[in-house]
Every structure is written in structure tokens, then in C-alpha cells.
Amino acid sequence: MSDKPGRPRSATIKDVAREAGVSYSTVSRVLNDYRHVHPDKRRRVLDAMERLGYTVNLQARSLAGGRSQMVGLVVHDLGNPYTAQIVQSIDEELATAGYELALHTTHGHHHKEAVYVDLLTHGLADGVLMLIPLGPTPYLRQLRDRNYPYVILSDHQQHDGYSPVVTTTSRQGAVDVMQCLIELGHRRIGFIGGRHDFVSAAERLDAYRAALAACNLSFDPALVQAGDYQYRSGYAAATALLDLPQPPTAIFAANDLMAFAVYDVARSRGIRIPKDLSVVGFDDVPQASYMHPPLTTVRQPLIEMGRTAARLLLQAIENPAQPADMVVLPTELVIRDSCQPPAHFSRRFPSTTAETKGV
Amino acid sequence: MSDKPGRPRSATIKDVAREAGVSYSTVSRVLNDYRHVHPDKRRRVLDAMERLGYTVNLQARSLAGGRSQMVGLVVHDLGNPYTAQIVQSIDEELATAGYELALHTTHGHHHKEAVYVDLLTHGLADGVLMLIPLGPTPYLRQLRDRNYPYVILSDHQQHDGYSPVVTTTSRQGAVDVMQCLIELGHRRIGFIGGRHDFVSAAERLDAYRAALAACNLSFDPALVQAGDYQYRSGYAAATALLDLPQPPTAIFAANDLMAFAVYDVARSRGIRIPKDLSVVGFDDVPQASYMHPPLTTVRQPLIEMGRTAARLLLQAIENPAQPADMVVLPTELVIRDSCQPPAHFSRRFPSTTAETKGV
DNA sequence: AGTCATTTTGCAAACGTTTTCAAGTAGTGT
DNA sequence: ACACTACTTGAAAACGTTTGCAAAATGACT
């Protein structure tokens, strides 16, 4: 009743021991489900816990050498539906295994990664998951050396050779897009790039150029617009592309969010999709299928990626000695209704003779 | 080199002390920026930390009575863009104050709330934020009594009278929608409800009925379809509504996601929005404005809600004695292009004589 | 030199657990 | 009854910090 403003202490293992009339080691044993505890005492302890409303203190447990039952997750940006989806599936997988999630966002600041990783790996978390578009990775080596469980979730296929990684055939996905577009007859294909410092952005641009080259189509720099994976940049890029004296007949955006922006620019100018302009995105976030027309895009198995990474990490936590796995999940080109052959193009003409113009 | 499979211990405060040739309390004092440490020693300690790559162990610190610099966040579902947006803004606000986020998802299971809250409040976190559509709140009383810092983020306006709450004028938002629709001349307005166990769902349905009553319009149960805030349920509900022998001329969905579903059902039947059917949503998630046509909806200040809640919590952590605040943020009806007067309706006829039919 | 206040330091006791160790208690087979 | 297991228990030592207390060092006055 006359509590000081300081927090009233909550029941500890010792309180429970006193209440149940046993030693506190016994309580700990009950807590951890050890064999060799007399059923009677176990009952008494359980009752006492119930009466006192006891909750284990995770900090103390983990300090004492037990598990913290906490997994760290470092992401660069929560706002992206891509990230959100993955986070959700990680969360679900972890929850079923009885682990909690400590979420850290770098808000795009690379240098924060190391700080968070340090924090997490020194006691806080039993393992760490990283969803960051890393280029150079100074601190990963340390984790490896310390034999600390971690898994990388990557949106590109470049890796360091010693880290456990979950990734997708995303480069192939970009190639598939280009192939599909070219087969439909498109010759002037616009490209809206991703954030310059993300490896995935470079990868997709590279695939774009490679596919063009493979089909002997010329590369027109004017058709490539920078973006940063955000809606706004997509809008600007699409505007630039459609303002071209000779606008593209198809636009490939490096992610769905920017493809949505293409829709809006097109709509505002009365350009019909797919009749006047074909559009392809990347990621297949949930909204892609709700668009009008439904967006053709590269499906990244976001849910499976999260799940797999979480499972891998859980395994690594169980058995830290196990060698680093690398899992590559397949992407899939999901063809919906946002693409068709360009206007004035007839499939009857072999594609090599089609109206390629170069610049 | 010959490390046992067990993790190599990382540097502790004692290692630093040895390296620097001081006692470990001195190191602690340097760590916590205490006055009364000789500049020379401080330097030596700092250098030693640097050399050893020391990182503080948060578990230990918080066990010993310091702050964990961690805030718990309990949400019921990460998949919702509504939630995602709020989480993001909380995360940002917390990050600037140097706090980390421990995220717990109940996946819709009410009973998990208490478990997580227990976990978080016993050592793990310095304070707790709850974004849950709570009805009865057994465990909140305990928190209050323990004087533990917490803040509730609510999507409805009902509250317990002693908890600090951040909420919006969401009931009024629903009333605004109805008023707008009725003023446009709609008399048969369909309603797609939210998840039955969320207070906000009841609140919006209530507002729907109240608005109808206030305008002397009859309530037709057939026009109210159950939903659960998910896309699928919205699709089913919209289908049922538009299958009615006398379908509504406008549909009010209790959140945007379900409104999107209405768009799709309408499209699949060649019903034009807003010409043949007006649609209104709730929340104003980012996609709402990208829809075709852009969706009229009730804007909830998601970012501000998250920010405010985070700030309130931070304050409470600084000063646990301070009284519980209650902040009500305004909603706003954002009129875009998904509504217009019903077909065959002319504003010249006073609304009372319009074709209300009842059932 | 002697007193005092002030700054600087180290020791030791928490914090709430897990875990090792050794000792105690039954339960068996002879 | 006796030795042998196998089960059951409690005491005590970690884990890495913070913090209260008291001792030591310093400096400033007399």
C-alpha cells in the first residue's frame, strides 16, 4: 500500500522457493524441466509460481549461461513491403520455436549495422539474422571467428564464401523478364534502377544489359533511369522515360513499388497498360496482383526466404559447429496482364527483322 | 587457435580493467560517464576498450539495475500495412532516443499478450508499447500497480481510465464517411465490418447505424456484411453485397484493405467506380492513393500515432511518477475520386424524399 | 605539520538465474 | 542387514554489470 515510487520487485525464484518450501535450485530445475524432481515437490513449486505470479527473468537466465530465447534481426528499412513481408515470416517461424525477435533498423545507415550486431551478439540474442543489402562486410568475419550463429538474408547472389546465406535466383529473374519482353517483340525497353548502393540494383541492371546484348539489341543509355526502390523515384524515372522523344514500349522497374509509379504516370497521360505500354516489376509484393491490370513481376519467395533463414539460424543455434549452408531459392516470373506485344507489332514477322532502331 | 566448440568468451569489463591497469569499478564508471575519474585513467581505459574491442553486455547491465535501453512492442499482426506503418514510426522515434525495439507478435492470439507483457516487463525492457485491439485488459492493472512504464496505442476510443493511451477520433471518422455518403445522395449504403473481436470494428458498425438513424434512414441488415480486416473477407463481403437483388449504391469498408477488394469485385463485374458504385475505406494506408480511382478514405495519422506513443513512453521511463496521459489524434476524411452521387440521383430533389425502401 | 574538504579509487554486495558438486534418500538384490 | 544403484536435493559458484561504502590520495587552508 505504501509503496515507494521505485518499482516494487517482482517475484523471483527465491520467493517461489520460500513459498514452496524447497531450495531455489529445485525451482530452477522445475523451470527447466529437469528429470529427477519429485512429483510432489514439482507440484508444490508449480503451485507457488502460480500463486506468486512468477515470471522468469530472461536477462538473468541468459546471463547465467542459459539461452535468451531471443533472436536479433537487423534490417535496413521497415517501410518497404518487401522487408515487411520477410520480417513477418521470420517472426512466425521464430514464434513457433519459442523465440522472440529483437528488431533493429539501420534506417539505411551502413555504419549502424556493426553497432547493432555487436550489441546483439554480446549477450542479448542467441543468434542474429541480417537482411541488409551488404557490399563489404567487415564484422561478419568476426562473427564467424567467434563461432556466433548468424544467417544472412540477401536480395542478391554475391556472397563472401563463409557466411550462411539465404538468397534467390534474382539475377535470373531479371534475365527472365527481359527475355519475356523481347520475345513479345519489344525493342525499346526502359529500365528503372534500384538504390545505387544495393548490390541487387547493380545485379538487375547488369542482367538488363546482358539480356540486350544476348539478343543483339543495342543499349540505349537514355532508356535507363536511376531509382532508389521508392515510389517517388519510380515516378520521376517513369516520367523521364515517357518524356523521351522515342519512348519505350515496355518498362522494367527494379521493384514493384516503382512499377506502381509507372502505372500512375501512364494513367495520368492516358497511356493504356498493356496496350500502349508493357510494365514489369520485381518482388511480387501482395499488392502487385491487386493492381489494374494485375502486374507481371518476378516473384521472390519472400515468405519462404524468411522461414528458411529462421530455420537455418535455429539449427545453427542448436549446433554451432555445423558448416555454413547456402540456400538459393528460385524466383519465378509471374505473368499477369500488364504486358503484351508492342502496338504495330505482329508476331508473324520474325523478331530479328523487327523495328530496332538504336540511337 | 585450438578453440573448443563452445563460444570464445568476449572481453568483459574485467579484461578491460586488467589491460588498463585499473579496477573494474573504474571501468564501469568510465562506461557510465561518471564524474570523478582521473583523465589519465579514463584515457587508458578507453584505449584498452578499443584494443580489446569491448562491447557492453546489456543483459548484465540491466540485471545490475541499469537500463536495458530496450523497449518492448506488442502487436497482434505484422502483416497489416496499418500496423507496419505504425511500427516503423515507433522504430524511428525510438532510434533517435537511443532505444532498441523488442518486437512481439501475438498473431491474433489474445492470451499471448499477457505472456509477452510479463516477459518484457520482467527485466527485458525499460517500457512497453501495446498496439492491440484490446477489449478486457486484465494485465494492465498489474502494470499500473507496479508502476511500470507502458503506453497503449489504440484504434478505438474506449479506454480503461488509468492507462496512458494514444488513439484517434476514429469513431468520428466513420460518422464523417456516412455523412459524406448520405449527403451525396446515397440511401442504400453497404457496410463491410472488421474483425468481430476488435473494438474498432464494433465502433465503426455502431457509427454506421447511428448515422443512418440520425438521417432517418432505415437499417437493412442485408447491407451489413461481416469481414475481418483482411482482403479475402472483403472480397467475399463485396460479392455478397453486389449479389443482392437490390445492391447498394455505395460501400463503406471498415478498412482500406477490404475496400481494395471491393474494387476488384466491382471490376470483375464491369461495375464502374465511382460511376456505378461509390467506395470508401478506412486508415489511408499508402496504397490507397495509388488505386484507380484513388480511394476516398479516413486518414488515421499512423506516423504521428507511433511517434506520439513512443515519446509518451520515453517520458514515462524518465519519470515513472508522472500521471497517465491520454492523447486523441484527429482523423480526417480524405476525399479522393471513388465517390460520387448515385446514378439517377439528382441533387435537386431534397434527400428526404429519395428512394429509401427499407426491408 | 595538522586539519578538512574534495577528488579518486577499490572492494564487495547485489541483480536472478543456471549449473556443478557432493551429499542425502530410497529402492533393489543378496 | 549390506552393499549398490538410481533418484532427489541443497549449497555454492559462476555470468557481467552497477553501486554503496569506505579507504586512499590530493590539495587548500590554517
Image (tube, coloured by chain):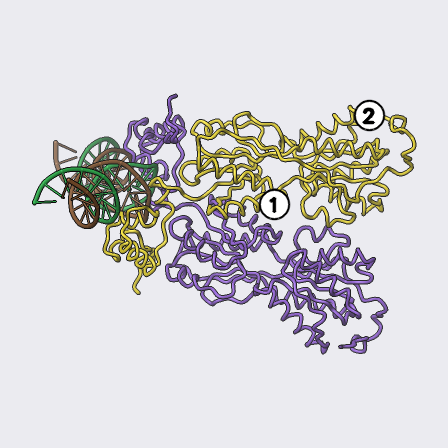
Chain colours: A purple, B yellow, C green, D brown
Q: Position of residue A127 (x, y in %)?
A: 43, 52
Quadrant for the C terminus of chain B in the image = top right
Can the viewer see residue A334 in this picture? no
Quadrant for the N terminus of chain B in the image = bottom left
Q: Closer to the N terminus: mark 2 or mark 1?
A: 1
Q: Residue at x 82, y 59 (%)?
A: A271
Give the answer, above or below, for where B33 lies relative to A297: above
The image quarter in which residue B212 lies: top right
Q: Which residue is mark 2?
A: B217
Q: Which residue is mark 1?
A: B85
Q: Position of residue B357 (x, y in %)?
A: 87, 27
Give the answer, above or below, for where A42 lies relative to C9: above
Q: Nearer the viewer, residue B288 or A209?
A: B288
Give the answer, above or below, for where A356 lies relative to A119: below
Q: Position of residue B225 (x, y in %)?
A: 74, 33
Which element carries disc 2, helix, strand or loop? loop
Classify 10 Å Cα crowding around label 1: few (below 14), some (14-19), many (20 and above): many
Q: CA distance from mark 2 to mark 1?
A: 36 Å
Q: Label 2 amino acid?
A: Leu
Can the viewer see residue A76 in this picture? yes
Q: Position of residue A134 (x, y in %)?
A: 52, 62
Q: Residue at x 77, y 54 (%)?
A: A293
Q: Residue at x 34, y 45 (%)?
A: B60
